[in-house]
Amino acid sequence: MQTETINSRPLSEIPKIYRVLSSAYGPMGWWPGETQTEVIIGAILTQSAAWTNVEKAISNLKSRGLLSFEALDKAEIDLLKSLIKPAGYFNQKAKKIKEFVKFAGKEFNFSIRRMEREDISSIREKLLGVFGIGEETADSIILYALNKPVFVVDAYTRRVLERHGIVKGALKEKYLNIQKIFHCSIPSTPENVEVYNEYHALLVNVGKLHCRKKPSCEGCPLKDVF
């Protein structure tokens, strides 16, 4: 991505997209989850899965009292696999959950409060060192579970930027370059945690309704804006 691209059109259009979608859809109420641990496990389970299926897996874990790090650490992996099966790729996801829990125990003594004390760059680097935790999942954990200002970039975000001509080549652009556009447009400050949270949810919503792999533009709030 060219530096001049970041310094020109996207910087003015990113806040505009937020205003348009917010006006169209209102508060999204993300991330669904009763506890920070549930949010973290949900962020892992939602990889390549529809949220309705993740909810079934979360419900199964909850019914067995397995939504704490300590309980997940003690759980047999075969039991874990059977409970999260609705979310798909259950063999890999069970391993990812186990590896994350192991990391949480070793680094933070299973304490989310201790995780929260880490600065963004530090916790992000540590999360990316955990098996199965990529950039999107790491940032979802940082934003939604740890309440820190980092923008989550997903496929819907890339499609919206690409299809509306805001960032050429957005579909293949490096994750951090796309994220930088949002951080430059809407500063990464504690005051903007809620904005980042809401913005990502709005992009997911317009993505599911309209900006699918095969676009369905009729009725899209962004159709006649960009």
Image: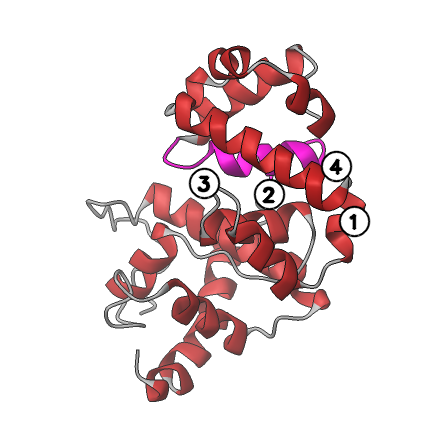
Image position of 114 with respect to 163: above or below:
above
Q: Position of residue 9 (x, y in %)?
A: 37, 82
- Amino acid, disc 3: Gly
Give me the residue at 39% from left, 31% from top.
49
Please tell me whether mark 3 sits on a helix, a strand or a loop: loop
- Real-space Cα separation, disc 1 to disc 3, in angstroms: 22 Å
16 and 45: which is toward the camera: 45
Dot 1, how many residues are within 10 Å of its Cα: few (below 14), some (14-19), or many (20+)?
Answer: few
> Which quadrant of the figure contains the N terminus?
bottom left
The residue stretch that appears in magenta? 30-49
Disc 4 on helix, strand or loop? Answer: loop
Please give the residue where the numbered disc 1 appears in the rendered image: 114
Residue 165 is situated, as x and y percent measured from the top left of the image, at 26, 71
Q: Earlier in the sequence, mark 2 or mark 3?
A: 2
Judging depth in this view, the residue of 16 and 129 nearest the camera is 129
Mark 4 or mark 2, earlier in chain: 2
Q: Residues within 10 Å of mark 2 (few under 14, many from 20)?
A: some
Q: Upstream in the sequence, badge 3 or badge 4?
A: 4
How far apart marks 2 and 1 lie (CA) works out to 23 Å
- For disc 3, the marked residue is 132
Residue at the spot of label 4: 110
User: Disc 1 residue type?
Assistant: Arg
Q: Give the residue type that dot 2 points to.
A: Trp
Residue 145 shown left or right of residue 176 in the figure: right
Pointer 2 residue? 30
Tell me the quarter of the picture where residue 101 sits. Answer: top right
